[in-house]
Amino acid sequence: MATVGRNIAAPLLFLNLIMYLIVLGFASWCLNRYINGQTNHPSFGGNGATPFFLTFSILAAVIGIASKLAGANHTRFWRNDSLAAAGSSSIVAWAVTALAMGLACKQINIGGWRGWRLRIIEAFIIILTFTQLLYVLLIHAGVFSSKYGPGYRDRDYATGQGHGHVPGTHAGEHKAGVGTTTMAV
Protein backbone atom coordinates (compact mmCIF):
# COMPACT_ATOMS: atom_id res chain seq x y z
CA MET A 1 0.00 0.00 0.00
CA ALA A 2 3.04 2.27 0.11
CA THR A 3 2.56 3.09 -3.56
CA VAL A 4 0.06 5.87 -2.79
CA GLY A 5 2.86 8.41 -2.29
CA ARG A 6 4.90 6.97 -5.13
CA ASN A 7 2.04 7.23 -7.64
CA ILE A 8 1.55 10.89 -6.82
CA ALA A 9 5.23 11.88 -6.49
CA ALA A 10 6.46 10.26 -9.73
CA PRO A 11 4.48 12.45 -12.18
CA LEU A 12 5.32 15.54 -10.15
CA LEU A 13 9.00 14.57 -10.27
CA PHE A 14 8.83 14.33 -14.07
CA LEU A 15 6.99 17.65 -14.38
CA ASN A 16 9.54 19.42 -12.17
CA LEU A 17 12.42 17.90 -14.14
CA ILE A 18 11.02 19.21 -17.44
CA MET A 19 10.41 22.65 -15.94
CA TYR A 20 13.93 22.81 -14.45
CA LEU A 21 15.39 21.88 -17.86
CA ILE A 22 13.41 24.68 -19.53
CA VAL A 23 14.54 27.17 -16.88
CA LEU A 24 18.16 26.07 -17.34
CA GLY A 25 17.97 26.55 -21.11
CA PHE A 26 16.32 29.97 -21.07
CA ALA A 27 18.36 31.31 -18.14
CA SER A 28 21.60 30.17 -19.78
CA TRP A 29 20.63 31.89 -23.02
CA CYS A 30 19.73 35.12 -21.19
CA LEU A 31 22.90 35.11 -19.08
CA ASN A 32 24.99 34.60 -22.22
CA ARG A 33 23.29 37.61 -23.83
CA TYR A 34 23.80 39.64 -20.66
CA ILE A 35 27.52 38.80 -20.46
CA ASN A 36 27.98 39.67 -24.15
CA GLY A 37 26.32 43.05 -23.55
CA GLN A 38 23.36 42.31 -25.81
CA THR A 39 20.62 43.40 -23.41
CA ASN A 40 18.83 45.37 -26.12
CA HIS A 41 17.73 42.13 -27.80
CA PRO A 42 13.93 42.26 -28.26
CA SER A 43 13.33 39.07 -26.28
CA PHE A 44 15.61 39.94 -23.38
CA GLY A 45 15.49 43.40 -21.74
CA GLY A 46 15.95 43.33 -17.98
CA ASN A 47 16.68 45.62 -15.04
CA GLY A 48 19.08 45.82 -12.07
CA ALA A 49 17.91 42.52 -10.57
CA THR A 50 18.39 40.55 -13.80
CA PRO A 51 21.98 39.29 -13.31
CA PHE A 52 21.25 38.09 -9.78
CA PHE A 53 17.98 36.53 -10.84
CA LEU A 54 19.61 34.69 -13.74
CA THR A 55 22.46 33.43 -11.56
CA PHE A 56 20.12 32.03 -8.95
CA SER A 57 17.80 30.62 -11.62
CA ILE A 58 20.66 28.67 -13.18
CA LEU A 59 21.80 27.50 -9.74
CA ALA A 60 18.26 26.43 -8.81
CA ALA A 61 17.84 24.61 -12.12
CA VAL A 62 21.11 22.68 -11.81
CA ILE A 63 20.44 21.68 -8.19
CA GLY A 64 16.83 20.85 -9.09
CA ILE A 65 17.90 18.58 -11.95
CA ALA A 66 20.39 16.78 -9.67
CA SER A 67 17.65 16.47 -7.06
CA LYS A 68 15.34 14.89 -9.62
CA LEU A 69 17.97 12.26 -10.42
CA ALA A 70 18.13 11.30 -6.74
CA GLY A 71 14.33 11.44 -6.67
CA ALA A 72 14.09 9.07 -9.63
CA ASN A 73 16.31 6.61 -7.76
CA HIS A 74 14.08 6.93 -4.70
CA THR A 75 10.94 6.44 -6.78
CA ARG A 76 12.46 3.28 -8.21
CA PHE A 77 13.42 1.67 -4.88
CA TRP A 78 11.01 3.49 -2.49
CA ARG A 79 12.91 2.68 0.70
CA ASN A 80 13.98 4.86 3.58
CA ASP A 81 17.67 4.68 2.66
CA SER A 82 16.96 6.21 -0.76
CA LEU A 83 14.61 8.69 0.93
CA ALA A 84 17.54 10.27 2.74
CA ALA A 85 19.31 11.30 -0.48
CA ALA A 86 16.13 12.30 -2.31
CA GLY A 87 14.73 14.19 0.66
CA SER A 88 17.84 16.18 1.49
CA SER A 89 18.58 17.13 -2.12
CA SER A 90 14.97 18.12 -2.76
CA ILE A 91 14.95 20.38 0.30
CA VAL A 92 18.13 22.12 -0.90
CA ALA A 93 16.65 22.47 -4.41
CA TRP A 94 13.48 23.96 -2.95
CA ALA A 95 15.47 26.43 -0.81
CA VAL A 96 17.51 27.71 -3.76
CA THR A 97 14.39 27.86 -5.93
CA ALA A 98 12.68 29.92 -3.21
CA LEU A 99 15.64 32.33 -3.26
CA ALA A 100 15.32 32.60 -7.04
CA MET A 101 11.59 33.23 -6.60
CA GLY A 102 12.37 36.13 -4.28
CA LEU A 103 14.61 37.63 -6.93
CA ALA A 104 11.93 37.02 -9.58
CA CYS A 105 9.44 38.94 -7.45
CA LYS A 106 11.98 41.74 -7.01
CA GLN A 107 12.60 41.86 -10.76
CA ILE A 108 8.86 42.05 -11.41
CA ASN A 109 8.51 44.74 -8.74
CA ILE A 110 11.29 46.92 -10.22
CA GLY A 111 9.55 46.80 -13.58
CA GLY A 112 10.90 48.00 -16.89
CA TRP A 113 11.00 46.13 -20.15
CA ARG A 114 11.50 42.40 -19.73
CA GLY A 115 11.42 40.18 -22.79
CA TRP A 116 9.33 37.06 -23.13
CA ARG A 117 12.22 34.78 -22.15
CA LEU A 118 12.72 36.56 -18.83
CA ARG A 119 8.99 36.46 -18.15
CA ILE A 120 8.94 32.71 -18.89
CA ILE A 121 11.82 32.15 -16.45
CA GLU A 122 10.08 34.25 -13.80
CA ALA A 123 6.82 32.34 -14.21
CA PHE A 124 8.51 28.92 -14.17
CA ILE A 125 10.57 29.76 -11.07
CA ILE A 126 7.46 30.91 -9.21
CA ILE A 127 5.54 27.77 -10.25
CA LEU A 128 8.53 25.52 -9.44
CA THR A 129 8.75 26.95 -5.93
CA PHE A 130 5.30 25.61 -5.14
CA THR A 131 5.52 22.33 -7.07
CA GLN A 132 8.91 21.57 -5.53
CA LEU A 133 7.48 22.22 -2.05
CA LEU A 134 4.60 19.86 -2.85
CA TYR A 135 7.13 17.25 -4.03
CA VAL A 136 9.14 17.60 -0.78
CA LEU A 137 5.98 17.11 1.25
CA LEU A 138 4.93 14.08 -0.81
CA ILE A 139 8.19 12.18 -0.45
CA HIS A 140 8.23 12.90 3.27
CA ALA A 141 4.60 11.81 3.73
CA GLY A 142 5.81 8.42 4.99
CA VAL A 143 6.82 10.10 8.23
CA PHE A 144 3.14 10.48 9.08
CA SER A 145 1.88 7.10 7.87
CA SER A 146 3.51 4.08 6.24
CA LYS A 147 0.54 4.04 3.85
CA TYR A 148 2.12 6.92 1.93
CA GLY A 149 5.66 5.61 1.67
CA PRO A 150 8.83 4.90 3.61
CA GLY A 151 9.43 6.91 6.74
CA TYR A 152 12.48 7.43 8.84
CA ARG A 153 11.28 4.98 11.47
CA ASP A 154 11.14 1.82 9.33
CA ARG A 155 13.27 -0.93 10.87
CA ASP A 156 12.34 -3.90 8.75
CA TYR A 157 15.66 -4.55 7.06
CA ALA A 158 19.43 -4.46 7.41
CA THR A 159 19.67 -2.82 10.80
CA GLY A 160 20.72 -5.75 12.94
CA GLN A 161 18.67 -4.39 15.83
CA GLY A 162 16.50 -6.54 18.00
CA HIS A 163 18.03 -9.94 17.18
CA GLY A 164 19.86 -10.44 20.48
CA HIS A 165 22.77 -12.36 19.00
CA VAL A 166 25.24 -12.34 16.14
CA PRO A 167 23.95 -14.31 13.13
CA GLY A 168 25.74 -17.61 12.68
CA THR A 169 26.38 -18.18 16.37
CA HIS A 170 24.51 -19.92 19.13
CA ALA A 171 23.25 -17.98 22.10
CA GLY A 172 26.17 -16.87 24.26
CA GLU A 173 28.83 -18.10 21.80
CA HIS A 174 31.55 -15.69 20.70
CA LYS A 175 32.17 -15.37 16.96
CA ALA A 176 35.74 -14.84 15.79
CA GLY A 177 36.47 -11.27 14.73
CA VAL A 178 33.69 -9.77 16.81
CA GLY A 179 34.96 -7.68 19.69
CA THR A 180 33.76 -8.00 23.26
CA THR A 181 33.60 -5.47 26.04
CA THR A 182 35.08 -7.65 28.80
CA MET A 183 38.75 -7.26 29.50
CA ALA A 184 40.98 -9.65 31.38
CA VAL A 185 42.89 -7.97 34.20
Image: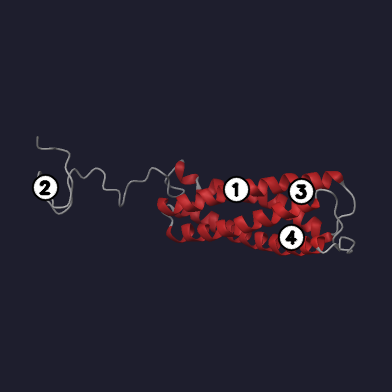
Q: Which of these two is toward me, 45 or 11?
A: 45
Determine the CA span between mark 4 and mark 2.
Answer: 62 Å
Three-letter residue code for mark 3: Ala
**Circle nearer the N terminus (1, 3):** 3
How far from the left and from the top, in percent, is residue 73?
Answer: 48, 60
Three-letter residue code for mark 1: Leu
**Circle 2 — which element?**
loop
Please identify, in this view, whether the residue under mark 2 or under mark 1 is nearer the observer.
2
Local crowd size for mark 4, using a 10 Å CA cut-off: few (<14), some (14–19), many (≥20): many
Local crowd size for mark 3, using a 10 Å CA cut-off: few (<14), some (14–19), many (≥20): many
Three-letter residue code for mark 2: His
In percent of the image, x 44 and y 54: which residue is there? 82
Q: Residue furthest front?
A: 185
**Circle 4 — which element?**
helix
How far from the left and from the top, in percent, is residue 46?
Answer: 85, 54
Determine the CA span between mark 3 and mark 4.
Answer: 12 Å
Determine the CA span between mark 3 and mark 2.
Answer: 64 Å
Residue holding disc 2: 174
Q: Which mark is residue 148?
A: none
In percent of the image, x 80 and y 52: which residue is there? 50
Local crowd size for mark 1, using a 10 Å CA cut-off: few (<14), some (14–19), many (≥20): some
Q: Which mark is residue 27?
A: 4
**Circle nearer the N terminus (3, 2):** 3
Residue holding disc 1: 134
Residue holding disc 3: 104
**Circle nearer the N terminus (2, 1):** 1
Check contact, mark 1 vs mark 4: CB within 8 A. Answer: no
Please identify, in this view, whether the residue under mark 3 or under mark 2 is nearer the observer.
2
